[in-house]
Amino acid sequence: MRIWRGETISRAAWVAALLLLLGLFAALSHLSATTIDYSRYNPEWNGTSRLFQLMDDHGAIMVTRPVDLPASGDAILLLLVPDGEFDQDEISRLRRFMGEGNILVLVSDREAENLLLSGLGSGIRVHDANLSSVDRSYDHPSSVLGFSAGDDPLVAGISRILLNSPSYLEGGVPVFETSLLSWIDADGDSRLSKEETLQRYRVVATEQHGEGILYVIADPSIFINGMLTPRSGDGNSVFIQHILTAKPLLLVEQGHSRTASAPAVIRVVNLVKESTITKMALITLIFLAVSLFILQRRKEP
């Protein structure tokens, strides 16, 4: 009788161990997410978790310092939603990066990035304004449609993209621009007033820099989870695929980008989750626990 009780206690212990492992996995999943806008750790509509999964599928390399950028001309660097200033050494390295034949894609709707653009020797400028259009995808005039302009490789096969409260650009060669039925809604009444004029506005522009290319995109929300869902007639997903595959080497800036934003505990948990050694250890523990549980049940009378 004592042996039978011992086996019963042992079985209960293994059940408890399995439940503990499942609870630990659930806790890690909960602690690995945030709701910060544009964060790669945000799985909600305003996060970029789907984008980073796509980039991971393409073998993207995360770069935290411009000094780590390669010298070859086979790379594209995605600088998404910068936060904070770049120092002169960083700007100089980015200029050399483009001059070596690489591509830099700057995605921002803030005029603060004009300092970076100026330092890069670019004539493109971001203007943060309430861009509205009659040609839109939803009822609200800020759901502006951008139409392809010219024959840039990034617009191949795309007639239009869907924007969400974008800024507009001045300078450079247009890649996407609004229709002629667009205006800056200065008074915020969502209607065209007497003082507001209709014209085309540039939302994606490009420039040649030596052997390299600079792209500026005036709407970061193109890249959020809620805008990546393929919609009939809208080419957001195709546009992003063109960006991710424009060069053999895909680099993603994480030293200044708001996509890296998250509490320290979330970054640590995700680092542990993404570790190959951690994954192998966890799988081994689960397999060992299940195997011992099955063997224990077979020993019971």
Image (cartoon, grey):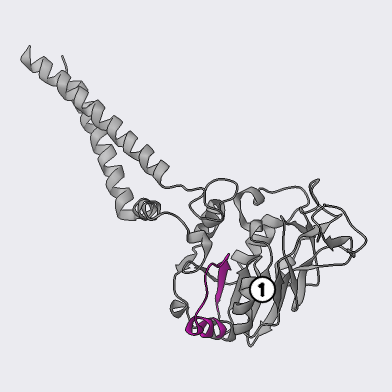
**Residue at label 1?**
215
Residue 169: name its quadrant. Answer: bottom right
| 283 inside magenta stretch | no
Quadrant in which the N terminus is drawn: top left
Quick check: 70 above or below 191? below
Q: Which residues are magenta?
A: 74-95
Residue 218: name its quadrant. Answer: bottom right
In front here: 188 or 142?
188
**x, y percent for residue 104:** 60, 75
| Residue 120 visible in this rendered orientation of the protein | no
Identify the residue shown where x is 56% and y is 45%: 44
Quadrant in which the C terminus is drawn: top left
Tag 1: Cα neighbours inside 10 Å, few (<14), some, or many (≥20)? many
Residue 291: name its quadrant. Answer: top left
In front here: 69 or 259?
259
Quick check: 14 above or below 72? above
Q: Total of numbered circles in the picture? A: 1
| Residue 218 visible in this rendered orientation of the protein | yes
The furthest residue to the right: 194
> Left or right: 298 with respect to 161?
left
Mark 1 is on which residue type?
Tyr
**x, y percent for residue 294:** 24, 27
Identify the residue shown where x is 66% and y is 73%: 215
**x, y percent for residue 255:** 46, 69
Identify the residue shown where x is 51% and y is 48%: 35
